[in-house]
Image (tube, grey):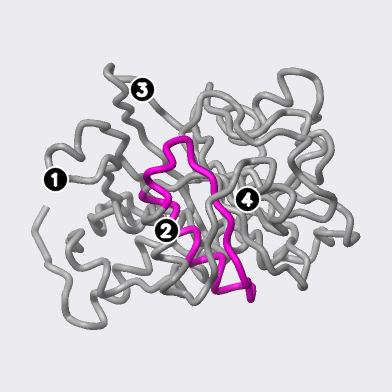
């Protein structure tokens, strides 16, 4: 079995690698070549979450599982709160193939998913990016969005405003003007809005969002989380990574529960990638991507990390 530790990931997998790997995984899902297994997630108390996301991609020859979760006390220990590892197996025999550090890969694959949605669903003439949330993942989201559209400015809101200057420094690195604003002002200016929070209640409301906006809602991945008002999903064309997760643990769970959104109204983004769905159909349409985070994303970027590590002679082999 090969070991690719967390310390190697930053030097192996680029954002472009993650984008290509996740795009291929979404397309394989749409073609029926790959599917995710049910998510297992447990609360451990004191805000800690632990779970497993797994699946198989027959086209990519990948079978595996990501094990990990959220441990809010980690920052005080000098560690990031999200901790995970990815385990890959031979899909023909079940034999273990690799263990891969999953922390940076999780951030890269999450940012790649939102960037894919922006690339395929946002208007071509967008200029202002709105960021709702300023935590660890927000910087990855901002950089990924800037790679697929030529933004001029970033407007941002966070529940704790003292975190916004850090995001502002990322915008400055990218040559983008940055302004901390209210949610009302953010919606009035932004052509694309990325929400990346761990909120238990909606922050962004339906009335905040203008026609023609694209939203990438990336923070809701657990039952009970919520970033946007359900009425917004009822007004938008809704896309997702996987419909089943969208309805149960994603942003759509609330609109579905209220009867505002039907399963048939949620489109897998892979169908846009394969040409089975046209995506955005008008300049005034609101498009919304519900990024729940599927296991196949993790497996795709981990497999890419293994390939790169092997090619560079950096993977460690252990007997099992």
Q: Does dot 4 land on a helix, a strand or a loop?
A: strand
Looking at the image, can residue 1 be seen? no
Q: Residue at x 78, y 36 (%)?
A: 207
Foreground disc of the pair 2, 3: 2
Name the residue beneath numbered marker 1.
78
Q: Does dot 2 land on a helix, a strand or a loop?
A: helix
Instruction: Tell me if label 2 and label 1 are in contact, CB under 8 Å.
Output: no
Q: CA distance from mark 3 to mark 1?
A: 24 Å
Name the residue beneath numbered marker 4.
216
Residue 12 percent coordinates (x, y): 29, 74
Find residue 292 and report its image quarter. top right
Q: Name the one closer to the observer, 195 or 39.
A: 195
Q: CA distance from mark 1 to mark 4?
A: 30 Å
Q: Which residues are magenta?
A: 136-164
Please give the label number shown on residue 42.
3
Label whose residue precedes the other's in the sequence (3 or 1): 3
Label whose residue precedes the other's in the sequence (1 or 4): 1
Q: CA distance from mark 2 to mark 3?
A: 27 Å
Instruction: Tell me if label 3 and label 1 are in contact, CB under 8 Å.
Output: no
Q: Residue at x 27, y 52 (%)?
A: 95
Please give the label number shown on residue 139.
2
Residue 224 percent coordinates (x, y): 53, 21
Q: Residues within 10 Å of mark 3 (few under 14, many from 20)?
A: few
Q: Does dot 1 land on a helix, a strand or a loop?
A: loop
Residue 204 percent coordinates (x, y): 65, 36
Residue 158 lies in the magenta stretch? yes
């Amino acid at each position: 079995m090969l070991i690719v530790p967390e310390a190697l990931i930053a030097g192996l997998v680029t954002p472009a690698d993650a984008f290509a790997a996740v795009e291929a995984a979404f397309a394989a899902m749409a073609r029926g070549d790959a599917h995710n297994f049910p998510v297992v997630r447990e609360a451990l108390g004191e805000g800690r979450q632990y779970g497993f996301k797994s699946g198989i991609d027959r086209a990519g020859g990948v079978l595996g599982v990501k094990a990990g979760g959220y441990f809010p006390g980690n920052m005080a220990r000098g560690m990031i709160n999200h901790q995970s590892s990815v385990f890959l197996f031979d899909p023909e025999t079940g034999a273990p193939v690799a263990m891969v550090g999953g922390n940076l890969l999780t951030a890269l694959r999450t940012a790649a998913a939102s960037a894919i949605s922006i690339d395929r669903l946002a208007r071509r003439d967008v200029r202002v990016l709105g960021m709702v949330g300023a935590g660890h993942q927000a910087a990855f989201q901002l950089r990924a969005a800037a790679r697929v559209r030529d933004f001029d400015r970033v407007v941002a809101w966070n529940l704790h405003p003292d975190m916004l200057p850090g995001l502002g420094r990322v915008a400055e690195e990218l040559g983008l003007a940055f302004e901390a604003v209210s949610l009302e002002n953010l919606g009035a200016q932004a052509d694309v809005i990325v929400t990346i929070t761990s909120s238990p209640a909606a922050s962004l409301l339906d009335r905040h969002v203008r026609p023609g906006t694209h939203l990438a809602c990336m923070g809701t991945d657990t039952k009970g989380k919520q970033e946007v008002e359900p009425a917004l999903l009822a007004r938008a064309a809704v896309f997702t990574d996987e419909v089943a997760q969208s309805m149960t643990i994603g942003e759509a769970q609330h609109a579905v529960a209220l009867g505002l959104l039907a399963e048939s109204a949620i489109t897998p983004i892979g169908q846009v990638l394969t040409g089975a769905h046209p995506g955005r159909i008008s300049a005034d349409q609101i498009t919304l991507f519900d990024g729940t985070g599927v296991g196949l994303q993790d497996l795709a970027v981990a497999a890419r990390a293994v390939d790169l590590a092997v090619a560079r002679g950096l993977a460690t082999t252990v007997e099992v």
